[in-house]
Structure formats: C-alpha cells, structure tokens
Image (spheres, rainbow, N blue to C red):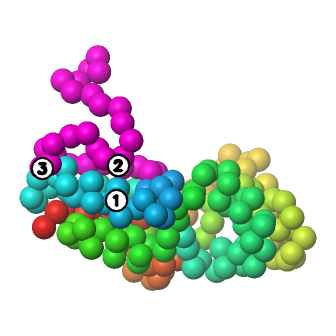
C-alpha cells in the first residue's frame, strides 16, 4: 500500500475488484495450492477481472506423469509425505488438465513452457528421495548419493545447474511430454 495507488488483500473467490479492471493478472506458485473444488471459481475470477485481450501470466505447480513421480506414487503414503505435504500442493492436476481448465473459462494459452519435465536437480533428489524411497530401489539410492556429492561440491553443482538449464529450456521443450512437467509457465489471453 505504501508503493502502489491501490493495494488489496483478499481471498481469490471473489477477487474484490470490478470486472474487466486489469490488463494482466500474475500468479506464481498459487494454482497448485487451490483445492480441486475451488479451481473453476478461481479461473472464472481471473477471467472476470481481465479486460478482453488481457493476459494472465502464471507459474503453476502440476501433477506429473514423469517416470520418477510414477515410481514415487507406487507408495501413496510416502508420496503424500514427501511430495504433497511439505509444500501444501493440495490441488495438483496434470498440465493438460490445467490448460483445459483455463480454456473452459475463455483463457487461451498463447505461450507455454514445460518446467522440470526431464532430469531432476540434485536438490530435488534429496528433498523427495533421500528417505524411505532409497530402500525401494538401488537406482534411487545411487542417484541420491550422486546428488549429495553434487550439493557438497560447488563446481559439480554449477555444472549440474547449467546442464539441467540447457536441457530443460531447449530440447526439453519439444522432447518431453507435456504431462511430464512438474510446473508450467504459461501465458493465457482472455478471448
């Protein structure tokens, strides 16, 4: 409020702003925290407050069919404990479902980037798999150990981050399936 002409703190349903008020709505790491029964109402509110031709720019946490997540989901209790609960991701849905949901509210995707659809970052390995999952697979245990070494060595970590960045933001955009993404960066335009 000290820096802007108008500042409002509210929930998302409803957004206490008049219809068609904004050229742009931005969300970052919000949509994956909204319970499924409320998602359509939130999308409808975003569409309502946008002007025709307005844009919604979003980074959205998603469910994923990534092979490592399919492995993790074999043990629902562990998956809940190490993937859902730590970050409060109670409303994850597949990337294709996210795009369909926004489209139902006349928000057309005009740009979309898949994020974390390929190799995992060493920090992700440790956050999600440095636990009982190690005991479920020797391959997982080896990956966790490699990640520990990378985290402990600034040169290895830098090389991993550069390599992962190159893979994810180049070849990964066209080679990894949409529903393998763990996040989407997407721009929607109101019809």
- CA distance for labels 2 and 1: 7 Å
> Is residue 170 visible in this depiction of the protein?
no
Res 67 quadrant in image: bottom right
Q: Nearer the viewer, residue 103 or 114?
A: 103
Question: Where residue 34 sits: x, y (%)?
Answer: 47, 55
Disc nearest the viewer among 2 and 3: 2
Q: Are marks 2 and 3 in contact (CB under 8 Å)?
A: no
Residue matched to label 1: 41
Name which residue lies at 67% across and 61% down.
83
**Residues under labels 1 and 3: Cα distance?**
16 Å
The residue closer to the viewer here, 120 or 155, is 120
Q: Mark 2 touching mark 1, by CB under 8 A?
A: yes
Are the residues tagged 1 and 3 within 8 Å (C-beta)? no
Few, some or many residues within 10 Å of mark 2 (<14, 14–19, 20+): some
Q: Please state the horizontal and vertical placement of residue 16, each as a whole percent of the image.
A: 26, 39
Whole-Å distance between the Cαs marked 2 and 3?
16 Å
Give the residue at mark 2: 13
Task: Check disc 2 and report its element: helix, strand or loop.
Answer: loop
Q: Position of residue 63 (x, y in %)?
A: 54, 70
- The percent position of residue 162, horizontal first and vertical second, equals 53, 58
Image vertical order of residue 2 relative to residue 73, above or below: above
Q: Residue at x 27, y 28 (%)?
A: 7
- Residue segment shown in magenta: 1-30
On residue 59, the disc is none
Dominant secondary-structure state across the stretch colored magenta: loop
- Above or below, 51 relative to 74: above
Q: Is residue 12 magenta?
A: yes
Residue 144, placed above or below residue 152: below
Query: Callout 1: 10 Å neighbours few (<14), some, many (20+)?
Result: some
Residue picked out by circle 3: 20
């Amino acid at each position: 409020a000290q820096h802007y002409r108008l500042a409002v703190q509210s929930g998302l349903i409803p957004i206490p702003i008049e219809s068609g008020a904004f050229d742009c709505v931005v969300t970052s790491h919000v949509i994956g925290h909204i319970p499924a029964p409320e998602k359509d109402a939130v999308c409808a509110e975003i569409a309502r407050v946008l002007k025709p031709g307005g844009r919604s720019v979003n980074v959205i946490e998603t469910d994923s069919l990534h092979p490592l997540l399919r492995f993790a989901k074999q043990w629902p209790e562990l998956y809940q404990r190490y993937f859902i609960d730590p970050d409060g991701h109670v409303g994850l849905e597949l990337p294709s479902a996210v795009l369909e949901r926004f489209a139902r509210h006349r928000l057309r995707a005009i740009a979309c980037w898949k994020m974390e659809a390929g190799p995992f970052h060493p920090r992700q390995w440790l956050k999600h798999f440095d636990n009982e999952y190690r005991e479920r697979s020797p391959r997982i245990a080896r990956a966790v150990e490699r990640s520990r070494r990378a985290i402990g060595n600034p040169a290895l970590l830098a090389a991993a981050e550069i390599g992962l960045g190159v893979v994810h933001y180049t070849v990964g955009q066209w080679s990894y399936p949409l529903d393998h993404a763990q996040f989407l960066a997407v721009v929607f335009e109101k019809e």
